[in-house]
Amino acid sequence: MDAKSLIARRVAQEIRPGMLVNLGIGLPSLVASFVPAQAGVFFQAENGVIGLGARPPEGMEDPHLTDAGGGFVTAVPGAASIDSAMSFGLIRGGHLDMTVLGGLQVDELGHLANWKVPGKMVPGMGGAMDLVTGAAKVIVAMQHVAKGESKLVVRCTLPLTAMRRVDLIVTDLAVIEPGDEGLVLRERAPGVSVEDIKNASLARLIIPDHVEEMQFP
């Protein structure tokens, strides 16, 4: 299993029937592929869709049906198209059960930086600030190390997305839960040791006596 699929599959286990869930651009959008269409979950994108499904088979793409990043998606039965004002009303009004976002850095305080790299032109943070602030649960889905540098840092050096602490971090190496005392290591990926995770992290991790391996039914 490749790293991105492992992360998406593990995040999908956090989703329950009846939830309204926002999936961010990139890696988080893969999560929909691991949640059965009949599970009663509605995925929302801030560009105005509720009821996103998995990516369509090649040749079946509909140019009018995309996620917030412009990627092609399908729609599940009961899906709805809404305007941007209502979409952000759902987000800012606290009606989202969960958001899954990518990350550039997460620090020991559980702060997320995921929208800007200094020196690179970006159009803005999009809905990320609203999502981190407004969703009931915030999950960061990201690879543990990128370009040889750990994404788990002592303090974020990139601009923060919001001051709120995220609820869960899922990487290709571990599941980590930020708390009042710091980052708690909850699970390790198959074949990955606790020592591997410590060596791949700049942030200090709180390590329980027993750390379970991720399970994939």
Image: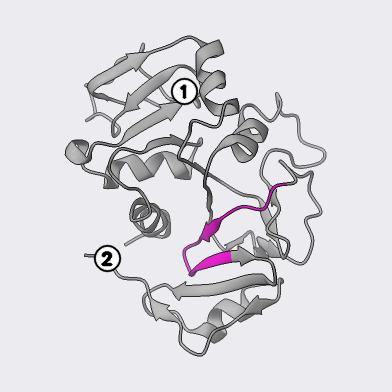
Question: In front: 120, or 21?
Answer: 21
Above or below: residue 53 compared with residue 168: above
Q: Which mark is residue 20?
A: none
Q: Residue at x 73, y 61 (%)?
A: 109
Above or below: residue 104 compared with residue 213: above
Question: In front: 151, or 89?
Answer: 89
Q: Where is residue 45? Give x, y as percent.
A: 46, 26
Q: Which mark is residue 216?
A: 2
Circle 2 or circle 1, nearest the eye: 2
Q: Residue at x 75, y 42 (%)?
A: 117
Q: Where is residue 84? Give x, y as percent.
A: 53, 13
Left/right of residue 118 with respect to residue 150 in the rendered view? right
User: Element type at marker 2?
Assistant: loop
Above or below: residue 125 compared with residue 188: above
Q: Which mark is residue 70?
A: 1
Left/right of residue 209 with respect to residue 30 in the rendered view? right
Q: CA distance from mark 2 to mark 1?
A: 30 Å
Above or below: residue 98 compared with residue 179: above
Asked if the stretch drawn in magenta spans residue 166, the answer is yes
User: Element type at marker 1?
Assistant: loop
Q: Dot 2, crowdedness within 10 Å: few (<14), some or many (≥20)?
A: few
